[in-house]
Amino acid sequence: MAEAKIIIYGAKSIALGIGEAVRKLYPENPPLCFLVGSLQGNPSMLMGLRVREIEEFVSATGQENLGGFHVLVGTPEDMHQDIAGILRRYGFYNYTCMDSRKEAALMERYFNRLDIFPSVHSLPSGNGRISLQVYLAKSAKDKKLSRAFSQPEWAVPIQVGAELTDLRTGELTDHTACGRSVEYESSNDLQNDSCASYSISAKNGNYCELTALYWIWKNRLCSSLGEAGEYYGLFHYRRILDISDEDLRRMKAAGTDVLLQYPTLHEPDISEHHARYMKEGDWEAMLRALRELQPEYAEAFPKILAQPYFYNYN
């Protein structure tokens, strides 16, 4: 039996990364095309391949022939259930939803093959234990999780925008709104007496999780409050790095400075990202401010935008 031909569902950065990885790692069976529900808001070509509406593809191929294709769903995970339903409705039953673990494993192999963005898993094993404080940004607007998940003891919840609402996440002490005394059950709560006076919690609508970074900067990195840590970090709302104890020992042994997620891929470069999500007037205002306030950064900025790799989510 012939091997099923690969199709990628999606046409944004996740789909592009999966497509490039499959093409590099499996040159004998590269992606055939990209599928989307509608071409509106999507490119017509990606990786030199057509981006096709699923209805048009099924009509041209014939539903009786869809068993010869394997669809890799390359979209945010919150869309997977709906997309799986769409695929089945059109007659696709051979598909894989590329969740965060599957995507990470694929992209790790891809970047290893390119010899860029080395993985923490490639570092030699170690024995030492590092001192680590990673702040887990949460919001009162977060929906309740359908199932609980455990957090390591070094992940410290931090409620951003707490000064803008009386609602609490249910397991946080309100450290960003000084002067309030609220107690919850979580043993990882930051205490109000560590709040000091350095908070921009009220500006969360403008700076999102950067208000948490500001708090960490002023109340931990620039303060004697609490124990000094070798590593500080931030998990951006529901985005969590999958870090094992062995990974931490490897970082210690190798003297690793920074641990990041894998970057997303963009075509033709990462300038297409801001074009999708930002008003052009706002972008131009930022560029003018950059040229006036930080001319050296302004000179380097176009080179950054000309890259295909983008570290998103701050």
Image (cartoon, grey):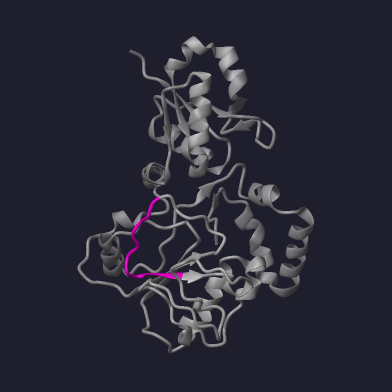
Q: Image point 24% across, 60% down: which residue?
A: 124
Residue 197 picture location, percent across and down: 57, 87
Farthest-out residue, bottom: 224
Residue 68 vs 29, above or below: the answer is above
Q: Quadrant of the C terminus?
A: bottom right
Direction from residue 186 to residue 303 in the image, left or right: right
Q: Image point 48% across, 55% down: which residue?
A: 144
Direction from residue 100 to residue 270 in the image, left or right: right
Direction from residue 312 to residue 131 in the image, left or right: left
Residue 49 vs 234, above or below: the answer is above
Farthest-out residue, left: 127
Residue 32 picture location, percent across and down: 50, 24
Residue 168 vs 12, above or below: the answer is below
- Can residue 32 be seen in the rendering of this structure? no
Residue 183 picture location, percent across and down: 44, 78
Q: Image point 58% across, 80% down: which residue?
A: 199
Direction from residue 240 to residue 293 in the image, left or right: right
Depth check: 302 or 265 in front?
265
Give yes or no for residue 45 being in the magenta stretch.
no
- Can residue 24 be seen in the rendering of this structure? yes
Marks counted in the figure total 0
Magenta stretch, main secondary structure, is loop
What is the magenta range?
A: 147-157
Residue 282 vs 98, above or below: the answer is below
Residue 69 picture location, percent across and down: 45, 20
Which image quadrant is residue 230 in? bottom left
Depth check: 274 or 202 in front?
202
Q: Image point 66% across, 70% down: which residue?
A: 296
Q: Quadrant of the N terminus?
A: top left
Give yes or no for residue 152 being in the magenta stretch.
yes
Depth check: 36 or 13 in front?
36
